[in-house]
Image: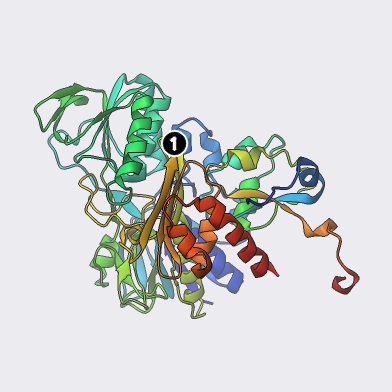
């Protein structure tokens, strides 16, 4: 059984776009397709999540990347942690 | 203060510059490049050709990013290296001294040795200017001939098709990319090309490019047929730009020979990217890649060693994700094929010698509906995979192959005739990933 991807709601409130930089060739399609002009490509180069607060999590960059570099991943920021982990 | 001179303006040099700067805030870094443009994405040129991005999006670094690296950039040619004097002679007649030197000069496409190869309208796809020239010709051309193999040939074919240029693709043998793809995979690509209006000519090569007033007007083929065209694109492989290393007396073969620290036969000179031929200390073999991710990693490793931090470049597999006739394709590890491909003289761009290794493994394949999956299943590991179309197993296989995950628990199931590879590997990978993350 394939793992269930995060729901649209989970993505919009909990997830960030993250990159596997070993797949990225800096073609720029992600940045080109971002409706609010976030330089997603630069995040992929620096291997950091797109944590820009303006990110709509619309998924254009994830869908358009021709190399499967980008994906949504739940940010640990809002995940419930047990008291021992805090 | 140590002075690092980096020759070449591509990803290997930039990665080395970033690494050196991160290690040594005071180091002097001079980047020498003969490209008239700042650092751009060479693989991105394919998407510019196909109209998916505009030219301005090909440049990953802003001026601000360059300022952050605090490096000097000099545009021009490095003419000669003087290893004894530790200096590089430049095309403007001056010389620059180095403590450590990186050769990241890349590779040029191999020219086609036929009469007429120097005519206007004969193009290649090495640089941004080459892509611009193809686009300019494609706007006027009615038909084109493409020769060669691997990824670059198809990037050109698809770029021309996107501009409604009737394209003849000439193949010397019976099928496309015969030393990486198997017959079914080649057939899948060929069928898609034909469906897109590309005319395929098998067992065909160019004997002469014909011209009129210095401009291409057609080709004569080995079977004495003539094809009228206004452009001829050549993608028959690449040659590492190793002349500087040769004249400096460094050890070279196909490329500049370097050890696992990317150091050449001169202790002060390193090489990375397409020009490097790297030793694998485990096997004693050397290998070359023409992959962005390898070039970047090699630049980083060379940068660390240039700063005096001993680091080995250990390669456990090669990865590329590309599009072949519009079909997303992931190639991982050793996929076999071994035999020579008549359409390529050596490596192509986006290519790896390691893919051609014929592993001691059993082939498991699955296909249908335009998708195809082929695994090389070794005794304990998946050692190679080729994923065409549906990419849901691309990332899992990347993890399983890169991390050399022991698949003994599912190997027998995988080898059963008609096994559903996804149904077996997905839960196995998920379980491994969860355990790995814990």
- The single residue placed furthest to the left in the displayed view is B224
Q: Name the residue under label 1.
A: B370
- For this rendering, which residue is in front, B32 or A12? A12
Q: Is residue A39 left or right of residue B12?
A: right
- For this rendering, which residue is in front, B376 or B401? B376
Q: Residue at x 40, y 75 (%)?
A: B260
Residue B186, above or below B108: above
Determine if residue B289 is in view. Answer: no
- The single residue placed furthest to the front in the displayed view is B417
Q: Chain letter for mark 1, please.
A: B
**Secondary structure beneath disc 1?**
loop
Is the C terminus of chain A in the top left, top right, bottom left or bottom right quadrant? bottom right
Q: Position of residue B105 (x, y in %)?
A: 36, 58
Tell me the quarter of the picture where residue B241 sits: bottom left
Residue B412, above or below B153: below
Q: Which residue is drawn at 12% across and 25% down?
A: B225
- For this rendering, which residue is in front, B21 or A73? A73
Q: In this view, does B266 lie to the left or right of A39?
A: left
């Amino acid at each position: 059984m394939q793992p269930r991807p995060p729901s649209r709601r989970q993505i919009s409130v909990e997830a960030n776009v993250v990159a596997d930089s070993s797949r990225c060739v800096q073609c720029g399609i992600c940045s080109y397709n971002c409706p609010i002009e976030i330089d997603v490509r630069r995040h992929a180069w620096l291997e950091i999540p797109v944590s820009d607060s303006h990110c709509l999590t619309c998924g254009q960059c994830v869908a358009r990347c021709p190399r499967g570099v980008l994906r949504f991943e739940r940010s640990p920021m809002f995940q419930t942690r047990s008291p021992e982990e805090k | 203060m140590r002075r690092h001179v980096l020759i070449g303006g591509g990803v290997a040099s930039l990665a080395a510059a970033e690494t050196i700067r991160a290690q040594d805030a005071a180091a002097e870094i001079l980047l020498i490049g003969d490209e008239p443009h700042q650092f751009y994405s060479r693989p991105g040129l394919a998407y510019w050709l196909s109209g998916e991005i505009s030219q301005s999006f090909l440049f990953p670094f802003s001026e601000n990013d360059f300022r952050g690296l605090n490096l000097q950039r000099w545009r021009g040619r490095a003419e000669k290296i003087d290893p004894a004097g530790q200096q590089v002679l430049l095309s403007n007649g001056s010389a620059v001294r180095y403590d450590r030197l990186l050769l990241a000069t890349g590779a040029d496409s191999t020219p086609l040795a036929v009469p007429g190869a120097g005519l206007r309208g004969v193009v290649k796809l090495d640089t941004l200017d080459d892509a611009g020239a193809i686009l300019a010709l494609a706007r006027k051309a009615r038909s084109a001939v493409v020769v060669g193999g691997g990824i670059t040939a198809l990037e050109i074919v698809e770029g021309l098709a996107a501009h409604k240029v009737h394209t003849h693709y000439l193949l010397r043998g019976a099928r496309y990319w015969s030393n990486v793809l198997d017959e079914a995979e080649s057939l899948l690509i060929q069928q898609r090309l034909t469906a897109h209006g590309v005319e395929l000519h098998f067992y065909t090569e160019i004997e002469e490019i014909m011209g009129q007033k210095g401009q291409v007007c057609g080709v004569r083929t080995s079977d004495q047929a003539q094809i009228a065209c206004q452009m001829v694109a050549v993608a028959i492989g690449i040659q590492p730009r190793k002349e500087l290393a040769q004249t400096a007396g460094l050890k070279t073969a196909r490329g500049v020979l370097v050890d696992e620290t990317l150091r050449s036969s001169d202790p002060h000179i390193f090489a990375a990217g397409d020009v490097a031929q790297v030793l694998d200390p485990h096997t004693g073999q050397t290998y070359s890649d023409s992959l962005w991710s390898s070039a970047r990693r090699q630049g980083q490793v060379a940068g660390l060693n240039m700063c005096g931090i001993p680091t080995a470049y250990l390669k456990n597999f090669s990865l590329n994700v590309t599009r072949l006739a519009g079909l997303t394709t992931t190639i991982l590890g050793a996929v076999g094929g071994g035999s020579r491909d008549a359409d390529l003289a050596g490596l192509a761009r986006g290519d790896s010698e390691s893919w051609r290794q014929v592993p001691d493994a059993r082939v498991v394949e699955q296909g249908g509906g335009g998708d195809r999956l082929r695994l090389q299943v070794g005794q304990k590991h998946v050692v190679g995979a080729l994923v065409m179309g549906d990419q849901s197993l691309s990332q899992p296989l990347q993890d399983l192959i890169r991390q050399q995950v022991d698949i003994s628990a599912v190997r027998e199931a995988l080898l059963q005739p008609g096994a559903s590879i996804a149904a077996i590997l997905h839960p196995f990978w998920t379980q491994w990933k969860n355990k790995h993350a814990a």
